[in-house]
Image: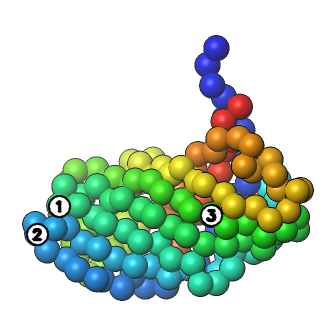
């Protein structure tokens, strides 16, 4: 038996510019990215609440560890998400991760970027209980305004 995935819902998030906390060749780059707003569609529909944060550590080898926390207001109630994962880009682009200008990301084909996370949900409505009764994975893509996330249920 092989596991199957089923697309459950998508989240489009608009973010602010990163705040660089630290950037050194030895320690990597720590940045905080404020979540401004967004849209939820699929099995649940609604909005991303403002005030969330994506905390990132880009290691010297170019691997980015992501830890985002944000809320959703959906048609079935509110959800709090803690989404932890990694993003990696092809080796030839990694030196540019430490530049101030990150627009080079738009030149990297999306299929060459590995962006995966494992969400943990808190739900406050019985209608959303299904979110805490299954395992989910998240696949992300950067967009011009922020990030596009697809949440898949592991069947």
Residue 76 image point, x, y percent: 88, 64
| Residue 150 in view | no
The residue beneath circle 1 is: 60
Picture quadrant of residue 77: bottom right
Residue 138 drawn at (x, y percent): 58, 50
Residue 113, given in percent of the width and then of the height, sits at 40, 51
Gap between marks 1 and 2 measured at Cα: 6 Å
N-term mark: 1 or 3: 1
Q: Residue at x 52, y 73 (%)?
A: 146
Residue at the spot of label 3: 81
What element does badge 2 sit on? loop
Mark 1–mark 2 contact, CB under 8 Å?
A: yes
Look at 69% across and 79% down and name the residue there: 49
Residue 154 or residue 105, whichever sits in front: 154
Task: Give above or below for 141 relative to 35.
Answer: above
Specify whether 98 is left or right of 110. Answer: left
105, above or below 144, in the image: above
Q: Earlier in the sequence, mark 1 or mark 2?
A: 2
> Can residue 111 be seen in the rendering of this structure?
yes
Q: Quadrant of residue 78?
A: bottom right
Residue at 71% x, 41% y: name it: 134
Does residue 1 appear left or right of residue 93 in this picture? right
Q: Quadrant of the C terminus?
A: top right
Q: How is the image coloured?
A: rainbow
Question: Residue shown at 54%/59% (left/top)?
Answer: 83
Whichever of callouts 3 and 2 sits on the residue coming sooner in the sequence is 2
Residue at the disc numbered 2: 25
**Quick check: 141 left or right of 31?**
right
């Amino acid at each position: 038996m092989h596991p199957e995935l089923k697309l459950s819902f998508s989240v489009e998030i608009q973010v602010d510019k990163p705040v660089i906390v630290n950037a050194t060749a030895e320690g990597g780059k720590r940045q905080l990215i404020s979540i401004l707003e967004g849209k939820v569609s699929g099995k649940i529909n609604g909005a991303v609440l403002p005030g969330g944060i994506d905390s990132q550590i880009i290691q010297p080898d170019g691997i980015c560890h992501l830890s985002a926390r944000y809320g959703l207001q959906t048609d079935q109630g509110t959800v709090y998400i803690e989404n932890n994962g990694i993003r990696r880009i092809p080796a030839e682009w990694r030196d540019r991760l430490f530049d101030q200008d990150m627009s080079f990301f738009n030149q990297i084909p999306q299929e060459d970027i590995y962006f995966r996370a494992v969400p943990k949900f808190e739900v406050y409505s019985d209608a959303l209980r299904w979110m805490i009764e299954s395992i989910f994975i998240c696949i992300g893509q950067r967009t011009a305004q922020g990030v596009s996330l697809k949440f898949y249920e592991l069947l």
